[in-house]
Image: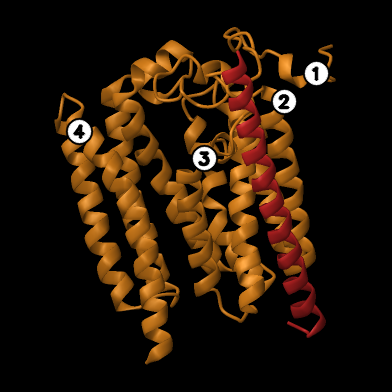
Amino acid sequence: MADLSDLSTVSIGPLAAPAAKAPAAAAVADYIAILKPRVMSLVVFTGAVGLAVAPGHLHPVLAVVAVLCIAVGAGASGAINMWYDRDIDAVMRRTAARPLPSGRMLPGEALGFGAVLAVGSVAVMGLAVNWVAAELLALTIAFYVFVYTVWLKRRTPQNIVIGGAAGAFPPMIGWAAVTGGIGWGAVILFAIIFFWTPPHFWALSLYRSQDYAAAGVPMLPVVAGPRETKRQMLLYTIVLFPVALAPCLLGLAGPIYGAAATLLGLVFIGAALQVWRDDGQMAARRMFGFSLLYLFLIFSALLADHIAGAML
Amino acid sequence: MAETQNERQRTLKARNRALLLVLLALVALFYAIAIVRMSGG
């Protein structure tokens, strides 16, 4: 059994991380980088919208605490993910400059940092807000680390379909922070991100498939080829269309959101059709960029609709 | 070598300052949470 007393030297998988270089002190920027701030920003935004549109009231200070805990929990997941994936990160061009593969931070530092933030964010959420939200946050972190990173990512091309659930939990956590439970509205917000995730990640992996193949990550384009990937991307965008309109049917949103969801859904399907027809990489790159905009705009529309409804 | 040592010192100093700021922010946050919870929020 591996000696876990020195986690900085534990290697995982066939592609062990490069030997630890002389430990230059990791800078503050490196600690921020391992929290994956760009991923965190989208997680925080969707979590905050879930909190804002949930029925009920939460003291503004506690609302800020809840969003902060979601952000820190997401960052903790990212740090632990970077610790575990440091071997494959070193192989892929997109991730080779990260603090761990580049040797600016020791693996044990990243794991310890992530673990402290994970425990801290769940404890503060439970003590300050409520324990349902804290349990959902703990589930999200555990799901991302153990189910996605450790179990699925290197084993199946369905990794981001099932693992994508971790990214779909934040609005549900925000909802639970206000209501103390999980309603149908929270389930629908979860479903929107869940069905959005596969076309989003597969668009990226279509033009990064060589990186994933070199690292031995069985992303769908690597295993099943671009044609099958494009077919599944189109199917998910078609399924996402009615799912994204469900908040209107549940009375969670009104005409502003309905119009935005319809328009954005049609453009997203159009982008998937362009990817289907395009033999190059341009359409996939465009679709990846638009997918980020889609999620931001659809949650913005939900928020705008909620604010407009409250004012009228 | 001395330059590398200086650079390391600078990095550690910056880290310590950041840690101080985080700790002060946590003190303020826990104070605010305690006030809100005690007032029934």
Identify the amino acid type marked 2. Gly
Output the letter for the chain in red. Answer: B
Identify the mark at residue A276; answer none if there is no mark.
4
Identify the mark at residue B29; answer none if there is no mark.
none
Q: Are marks 1 and 4 on the same chain?
A: yes
Position of residue A122 in the picture relative to residue A43 (left or right): right
User: Of marks 3 and 4, which one's residue comes earlier in the chain?
Assistant: 3
Which residue lies under the disc numbered 1?
A: A6
Instruction: Give the distance between the C-alpha atoms of the residues marked 4 and 2, in whole angstroms.
Output: 43 Å
Kindly indicate the quadrant of the structure image that contains residue A182: bottom right
Q: Which chain hosts label 1?
A: A
**Label 2 neighbourhood size at 10 Å, few (<14), some (14-19), many (20+)?**
some
Identify the amino acid type marked 3. Lys
Q: Residue furthest front?
A: B2
Q: In the depicted view, which residue is nearer to us: A178 or A221?
A: A178
Position of residue A129 measured from the top left corner of the image (x, y, whole percent): 72, 68
Position of residue A175 measured from the top left corner of the image (x, y, whole percent): 59, 67
Kindly indicate the quadrant of the structure image that contains residue A95: top left
User: Of marks 4 and 2, which one's residue comes earlier in the chain?
Assistant: 2
Instruction: Give the distance between the C-alpha atoms of the residues marked 1 and 2, in whole angstroms.
Output: 7 Å
Identify the amino acid type marked 1. Asp
Q: Tell me the SS state at disc 4.
A: helix
